[in-house]
Amino acid sequence: MSALFLVVPIALIVSAAAVGAFVWSVRRGQLDDLDTPALRVLEDDDHTSSYSGDQMR
Amino acid sequence: MARSLNRDIVVIDEVSKSDLSSSSVFSSEKAEGPMTVPPDARSFVASLNEPARKSNAQEKDENKTAAQGAVLCSHCGLPVVAARRRAGLTLQFCCSGCETVHEILQHAGLDDYYAFRQRLGEAGRPVDEGKAGAVSEFDSVAFRRLYCQTNPDGSQNVSLLLEGVHCAACVWLVERVGRIEAGVVEARLDISQARLDLRWDPLQVSLGRVAETLRKMGYRARPQRAQEAARRRQAELRALMIRMGVAGAAAGNVMLMAFALYSGAVGIDEAGTMDHQTKRYFEWASLLVSLPALWAAGLFFRGAWASLRTRTPHMDLPIALGILVGFLWGGYGVITGRGELYFDSITALVFFLLVGRYLQRRHQMAASDAAELLHAVLPGEARIEGADGMRVSVSRDDIQEGTRVVVACGEILVVDGAVLSGRSALDKSLISGESDPVTVAPGDRVEAGALNLESELIVEATASGSDTRVARLMAEVNRALSTKTPLTSLADRLAGGFTVAVIVLAVVVGLAWLPTGVEGAIERALSLLIVACPCALGLATPLALSAAVHQAGAAQTFVFAPEALERLGGPLDLVFDKTGTLTEGRLTVVAYEGERDVLGLVAEMEVGARHPVGKAIRSYVEQHNVTRQAPIGATDVREVQGRGLETHVGQDVLRVGSEAFVGARAACGQWPPVPEGLSPVFVARGEAIVGRFVVGDTPRSDAAESLAELKGRGHRLHLLSGDHPETVAAVARQLGRCCGDPDLFVSVTGGVTPEQKLEAIERRQAEAGSRSVAMVGDGINDAGALARADVGIAVSGAAEASRLSAHVYLPKSGLNQVLELVEGSRRTLATIRRGIGFSLVYNAVGITAAACGWLGPLGAAVLMPLSSLTVVSNAYRSRTFGVARSLRVRRSAVDEPRSSARQTT
C-alpha cells in the first residue's frame, strides 16, 4: 500500500511530462502536417547527397 | 447531311499524313456546293462528337497494332498520337511539354521519379502547355512586399499553393526542385493543404523562375493569400490538438485507476477485496486527474452556453450537460464517499468527442477577407504616365484619381475610369459574364477587372483601389461570407429535442425511484443523465463528414466546408451560371465549310490574335493539323477594330470577319442559317466568299445529360447569367432540346450584374423553403452569389476569387462533376443518418438500463466505446465519393480519353 503512495504520483508526473512534451511539439508546428510525412516514408534514399531531404524550418 | 459532315472531318485527320495539295478529295465536295448544315443545333453538335469518338478509337487501334504494342509517352504514360511519333527512337512524347520536363529531370538526375511513380502505381498526366502568363507576378515588388519574408541570412521564404499535387511522387519531385534550380535552399510540401513552403536565395535564382519550373512540371503555383486567416486557423487547430492530447492523457490514466477500482470492487465478501483506504486514494486520484479533461472540455461548455443564449439547438448542449453532471456528481461522490463514479466514461467521452471535432476541423479551409479577394482579382501593379510623358510602375494602391494609367495589350485594368486615348476591345467576361468583347474608344467608361485585348489604352482613373466597382463587389462577397448563418447539421437539429427528452426522463425516473429512498432516486436519475450523454451522437456527423471529405479529395473534389455536404445531400435549388460553367467559357469553332486551301492563310493572319474569335480560329486550324502551304508572308495583315482582318494575296484582298465586314452581302444569303446561339465568321477572297466558320461558346458536352439527371433526381434547376438575355435563352433552349425537356430550367435569367446575382440568390433562398440553394459558377461575377448561397460550388477554371468564396471546388472539367458531388453528398447524408440511428439505439439501451437500475459505471464504460466504435466503422467503411465512377461509364471517350490509358502501362 505504501508503495502505491509513491508509485502513483511518480506515474502521474511522468504522464504530465509526456503531455508537456506533446504540447511543446504542437506549439512548434511539428504536428501541423500529418499527411505528408506518411508519404515521405515511401521514398528511397537519394543517390547523391547534394540535397538533404528533411531540414527543419 | 450530317453524314457528309462526318466524312469531312475524319478526312482531315487522314489528310494530315499525306499531301494536302492533292486536294482531289475536296474538289468533289466543292463541286456539290457548300455543305448544308442541319439547322437543328443538337444533331449538329452531336454529329461532331461522333466522328471525334471514331477518330479517337481509330488512334487507339493504331496504337495497339503498332510494333511493340501501344506507343506511350515516356513522361506521362498516355498514348502518343501518330502525328507526333518519331520513328526509331525509344523515347516518345505526347507533347513538347512532356519532352521538356523529361529533359529537365534527366539533367537534374531526378529520373528516379519514373521508377518511383511506377512503384506507387500512380498514372502520370501530360504537362500543362498553357502560356507562361502571370509568372512574372512572382518577381514584382508588390508581391515580395505582400508574401515574402526575408531571413537574416539573406534568403527569403514564401508559401505557395500548388495545383496538381496529388501523390507521393509529386511530393518527392516538388521537394527536390532545388536540384533543378540551384538557389532553392529548402522546399517543403504539405500535401493536404497543397502548400509549398519555399526558401530560396534571391541572388541565385528568382522566384518567378522557380514558379515557372514548377508550372512546367505540372504544378501551377499561386501565392497563399489570406495569410492572417490561415494563421488564425492554424492556431485554432493547434489549440484543439492540445486539448485532445490532454484529454487523452487524462482519460488513459483515469482508465487505469478505474481498472484498479473495478478489480478491487469484486471480491469474496460483499465489500470487495480492496481496503477502504486504497479505494479512497484511487477515487481522489481519479478526480484530480479528470480535472484536466474538464478543462479540455471547455469548448463544449462554451458551445452549449452559446446555444442556450441564442436559443438554437446544438450538439454541444446535451454533451455539456452529461459531462457537467458526471463531474459534479462524481466530485460529490468522492468528497462525501458515497455513490458511483463515472470519471472513466466521462474523460473517455471528452477525448473521443475532441478527436471527432479535430478531424472535422482539419479539412476546413480558412475564409478570406475582402482585401485578399481583391488581390486575387487585380494585379498589384500598374504603369502610369506622368505629365512629362514618363511612364513608371506603381503599386495599385498608390494610384490617385485623375492619374493617367497605361493599359497595354493583354493587361487587366486596375482602375475604374474613362478612356483618354486609344481604341481597343475589352474582355469583360471575368467580371460580368459577357462572352463578347466590348469595343471602347476615347470617352468611354471602363472598369477595373476587364482584360485589354487589342491595343494600348490610356485611362484616366476615376476610382482606384477599394473604390472600384470590383472592390466593392469583393466587399459584398466578404460581407456575404461573414454574415452567413452557420450550417446546422442534422445532429444539431436533433440535439435540442434530445436534451429536453433526456432531462424529462431523468426527472421521471427519479420520481419513480423515490419510494426506495431519496439518495437512490437521485443516483438513478443522474446516472441516466450521464449515460445518455451522446458520445456516439456527437461523433456521427463529424466522422462521416471527415471520411467523406477525404474520399472526395481522392476523387478530385475539394470540399472546404464539410457541413456543405449535408446540405447537398437533400433536395436542392441549383442555380447555374452560363459562361464557363454550362458552356466551355471560350469561343470555339464549331465547324468550317468551304475551301480548305485558304485555311493556312487564315491561320497565318490570326497568328498573333488576341481577339477570342481569332484565337478560336487559330486553335481550330492547328487542331486539324492542316499542312500549310509555303508561307505567303501575309505581313500586311490589317486589323479593323473588332470587325475583322484583311490582307493582300497577290491581287486579291483576303478578308476574315463578320458578314458586314466581308461585304458581298448577296453571297452570304446562299449559306444556310447558323444554328441558334452561334455566329458566322466569313472568309472572303476578293468579292467571293470562300468559306465560313461557325463560332460560338458551346455548351459542355456532358451538360445536357448531367442537367437532365439532376432534374430527374428531384432538384430544381435555374440559369442565372450576366450574358445577353437572348444568348442565355438560346443556350437554355438548346440544352432543353438536347435532353428532350423544354422545361429543363425552372427559371432563366440573363443580363444580370454581379450585384444582382447576389440579390437573386437571396430571393431564391427566401422562396426555397426547406430546399437548400446551391450556386454553381466560375467567374468573379459569381463570387458574391457563391458566398451568399447555402452551398457555393466553384467549377473548373474558376477565378481565384470564386474559389475563395465557394464551399466546394471542382477542378476537373465537365458538369458531371456536379452530378457526382450531389450523388456523393446524398450518400454522405445517408451515412450520417445511419450513424445517428445507431447511436440513438445505444442511447435507448443505456437509458433503459439506467432507469431500471441495472447500469453501473462499468456498464457505462463498456457501452460508450461500443457505440463509438459502431459509429466509427459506419463512417469509415461507407463509400461515398468515388463510388460514382459507375456514372462515368456512360461518358463518351471524348470526355475522358485519358482514363482508359491507365491499363496499358
Image: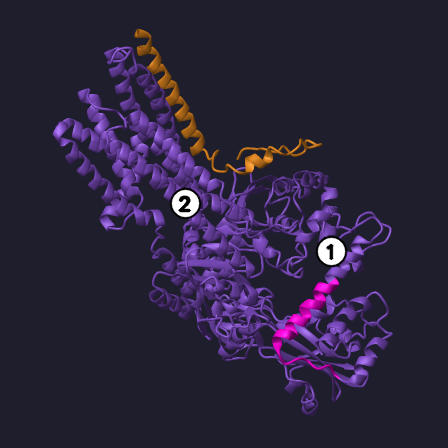
Chain colours: A orange, B purple
Q: Could you tell which of marks 2 and 1 lies nearer the N-terminus?
A: 1
Where is B615 relative to A5, above or below?
below
Q: Residues within 10 Å of mark 2 (few under 14, many from 20)?
A: some
Give the camera-side residue of B631 and B806.
B806
Give the camera-side residue of A44 and B903.
B903
User: Residue B124, percent across and down?
Assistant: 67, 48
Q: Name the quadrant of the N terminus of chain B.
A: bottom right
The answer to whether B379 appears left or right of B864 in the picture is right
Q: Residue at x 36, y 38 (%)?
A: B536
User: Residue B732, percent across and down?
Assistant: 52, 73
The answer to whether B903 appears left or right of B20 in the picture is left
User: Is residue B363 part of the magenta span, yes or no?
Assistant: no
Q: Residue at x 45, y 33 (%)?
A: A28
Q: CA distance from mark 2 to mark 1?
A: 49 Å
| Tag 2: amino acid | Arg
Residue stretch in magenta: B34-55
Badge number at residue B834: 2
Q: Residue at x 30, y 11 (%)?
A: A5
* Front label number (2 vs 1): 2
| Tag 1: amino acid | Cys
Please give the chain letter of the residue carrying mark 2: B
User: Which element is circle 2 on?
Assistant: helix
Question: Which residue is disc 1 drawn over?
Answer: B95
Q: Residue at x 47, y 75 (%)?
A: B750
Tell me if I can see residue A42 in this picture. Answer: yes
Q: Residues within 10 Å of mark 1 (few under 14, many from 20)?
A: some
Give the camera-side residue of B81 and B197.
B81
User: Which element is circle 1 on?
Assistant: loop
